Image (cartoon, helix red, strand yellow):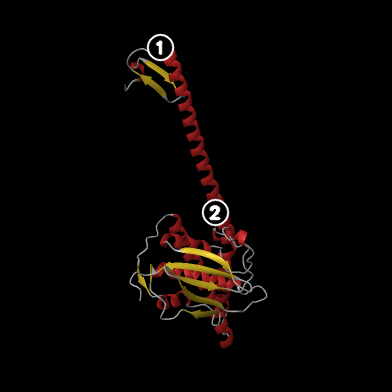
Amino acid sequence: PADPGQGDAQVAVDDTHVIVLRGTPLQARDRRVLEAFAVQTSLVLEHRRLRDQADRALALERAEQTSTALLRAVSHDLRTPLATMRAALDGLLVGRVPEEDRKELVESAATSADQLEALIDNLLDLSRVEAGLVHPAMRDVSLEESLPLAVAGLPPGSIAFDVGEDTPLVRTDSGLLERIVANLVSNAVRVSRQGPNAGEPVRVLAHETPETVEVMIVDRGPGVPEEQRDRMFEPFQRLDDTSAGGLGLGLAVAKGLSEALGIRLSAEDTPGGGLTMVVAVPRARSGR
C-alpha cells in the first residue's frame, strides 16, 4: 500500500525503510522470519551506504591528489617557460640588440612557447580522456606518412626514423596515433639526455606481426625498473626523471589515448640499457 499504516503487518528496517505486508495476520513464527529478513535488509542497505560513502571519499581523495600535483607542477613547469619568454621579450625591448643576441633571444622565446603549447595540449588531452570525450575516427592509415608528423619539430639528430613505405597499413585514428607517438618520442628524447649513453638518438621503427604493426620507440636512457612501469603511466609521475619541461603527463596521455583506440601500449627493456615503448596498432584488413 502507498501508506504503510494501511498494512496488516509491518517491520522497521531502519529509520527510513519499513517492510509492509497485507493479508492474513502473521503467526509469531512467520513474524520472526520477517524480522530476520528486515535485519538482513538493513545490513545490506548499510553496506551499500558505506560502500558509496567510501567511493565518494576515494574520488575526493584522488581529486585532491590530482589538484595538489597539478598546482605543484604548474608552479614550476608552466611558470618556467613563461619566465623564459618574458626574459627574452624584455631583452628584445631594451633597445638596440646585436643581431646574434637578438636571434638567440627569439629562439629562446620560440622554444619556450613550444614547451608551453605542448604542456597545455597534454592537459587538454588528459581532461578529454578522463571525461570520456575521445571519439576516434577510424580509417586505414599509412605509418610511413603519418608518423613523421609526430616527430616534426624535435631537435635535429635526436631521432633515427626507420619506418619504410612497405610497412603495412594500420586501422586507427591518425591524429590520435600521432599524439600517442609524439608524447612517447618527446619523453624518450628528454630521458635520453641522461645516463651513460646520453646523446644517442631515439630510434622509431616498425615491426610487423600477423595482427598488428608494432611502432617501437627505442631510447638509451636510464630505463625504468619493471616494478615501476605501471606507475609511470599515471598522471604527474616523473619517477627519476629530473629533466626540465614536463608535467609528467606525456605517458598518461599516451596510455589513455591508446586505450580509447584499442591499442596495446607496453614498455620493455632496451638491450644494452634504456627503455623501448611498444605501440601495437591493429593492421588494416585491406593489407597493402
How far across and down, in percent of the image, does residue 59 sit? 51, 46
Q: Is residue 173 shown left or right of residue 84?
A: left
| Frontmost residue, 52 versus 169 | 169
Report the residue at 57% width, 82% height from top: 104
Specify the farthest residue to the front.
Answer: 210
Specify the farthest residue to the right.
Answer: 196
Question: Which quarter of the image is occupied by the C terminus?
Answer: bottom left
How far across and down, in percent of the image, does residue 254 sit? 49, 64
Callout in the foreground (2, 1): 1
For badge 1, the amino acid type reads Gln
For badge 2, the amino acid type reads Thr
SS assignment at label 1: loop
Please give the label number shown on residue 131.
Answer: none
| Frontmost residue, 238 versus 28 | 28
How far across and down, in percent of the image, does residue 286 sit? 33, 72
Within-10-Å neighbours for mark 2: few <14, some 14–19, many 20+: some
Picture layout, residue 108 above or below residue 22? below
Residue picked out by circle 1: 27
SS assignment at label 2: helix
> Which of the 4 quarters of the picture holds residue 195?
bottom right
Report the residue at 55% width, 65% height from top: 267
Please give the label number shown on residue 66.
Answer: 2
Question: Which quarter of the image is occupied by the N terminus?
Answer: top left
How far across and down, in percent of the image, does residue 261 sit? 41, 62
Q: Are marks 2 and 1 in contact (CB under 8 Å)?
A: no
| Frontmost residue, 170 versus 97 | 170
